Amino acid sequence: MQDLFSLSDQLIREVSAKFKRYLFHEINWNNRLIGIKGARGTGKTTLLLQWLKQKRLPSNKGVYLSLDDMYFTNHSLLDTGNDFYRKGGKIMLLDEVHKYPEWAREIKNLYDRYSDLQIIFTGSSIIDISRQEADLSRRAMMYELQGLSYREFLKMCGYLDVEAIPMELILENQQDIRDIFPPDFRPLEHFDDYLSHGYYPFFSEDKAGYPLRLRQLVRQIVESDMAEIKGFDIRNAKKMLQLIYIIAQQVPFKPNIVNLSQKSRIHRNSILNYLYFLEEARLIRLLHPSGKSIASPQKPEKIFLNNSNLLYAIAETSPSIGTVQETFFLNQVSVLHRVNQPKNTDFEVNGKFLFEIGGAGKSSKQIKGSSNAFVVKDSLEYPAGNALPLWIFGFLY
């Protein structure tokens, strides 16, 4: 176990604390059992290491452990936790818990056994702790880490540092928006860069190789992470990848389940479940009709890729600007708000606000006569009447 301590110390020393994700400041770190889930590549590991770094604890008091480490093929988490606690341990950070078969049961045992041991764990966005054999949902405070917002991208790159802007301020107090930003801020200067390569924090490591790494990330999620989902047959991973590829060439589209089944060679009775799995893995987003509750997997009105970066990386040809615009809006707004497909406009938010997305020439014809309706334009720098700039929705978190 000493090797695990040494590795933990090394990772904590090396992690940079210059830029912290939005969730770092939203988590109540005083809770004794905290779960952080999110898609692969969004920065969960960095978040844990940054928090433990600021605690300034020796490794026998606070340790970072990745449960996909080879060590856990021959040692149980429960025994490791017992040993750690007996030697004075206080904080255990457990990464990639979905890679360890009995993670929920053994975390529960450690939590119940030691009242002064804090456990913080991370896992794929696909995990549902309420469905685990050892239900942690009543014990753990759960959070989800999204990819970078446009606001965070600008901050990470050193271009701009401002606080998140609530939807209410964007919609109801438009005259104040310009005052939030420095006079020399050009909101569209880096927007295209974000749309193509700014959603996952690892973009900074290799911009040229970013599209390839994204395609590899998709394959890893399908072939590795999704294997942990009950009901997903890993033998269908190739078909799932084909389904993603088909979606990427056509988004956004109203799916024909029979045609989608034939093209992907996935049985039509399984298509809806597989679409649900892909959404849980944060690879796609399903847009459902307004006014309908979603209690179980059902046919969506439209299917989008999760974010515009995936769109650029997977689509064979350059995606249409309209598709990029709608994908960005849905991705950023749905983090904090409920988004549906209304009858005559692009999006309905929180069952109240209507949005029509377009370019500079987009008219308000489709929202004429509708209250709480807005045109969102990609070329607009600041709000003008009921016309809102697309980029501002990247400042919601």
Image (cartoon, rainbow, N blue to C red):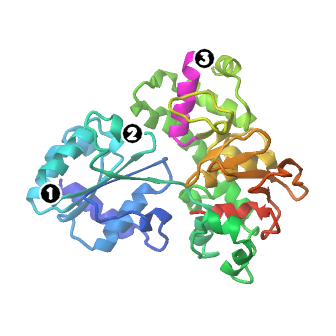
Residue 175 placement, left or right of 133: right
At x 71% / y 61%, what residue is drawn?
193
Residue where numbered disc 1 is placed: 115
Cα separation, mark 3 vs mark 1, equals 49 Å
Question: Local crowd at mark 1 within 10 Å, few (<14), some, or many (≥20)?
Answer: few
- Which span is picked out in magenta? 267-283
Q: Please state the horizontal and vertical placement of residue 124, each as a whole percent of the image.
A: 43, 44
Using the rendered view, name the quadrant where residue 290 is placed: top right
Identify which residue, 151 or 45, lies in the foreground: 151
Q: Please state the horizontal and vertical placement of residue 241, each as a whole percent of the image.
A: 59, 30
Residue where numbered disc 3 is placed: 268
* Above or below 161: residue 233: above
Identify which residue, 350 or 308, lies in the foreground: 350
Residue 308 in view of the camera? no
Q: Amino acid at mark 1?
A: Ser
SS for callout 1: loop
Q: Amino acid at mark 2?
A: Asp
Mark 2 and mark 3 residues within 8 Å of each other at the beta carbon:
no
Residue where numbered disc 2 is placed: 128
At x 25% / y 37%, what residue is drawn?
134
At x 89% / y 50%, what residue is drawn?
365
Query: Does the magenta run of residues contain 277?
Result: yes
The numbered mark at residue 15 is none
Using the rendered view, name the quadrant where residue 215 is placed: top right
Q: Earlier in the sequence, mark 2 or mark 3?
A: 2
Using the rendered view, name the quadrant where residue 101 is placed: top left
Per the picture, the main secondary structure of the magenta-coloured stretch is helix
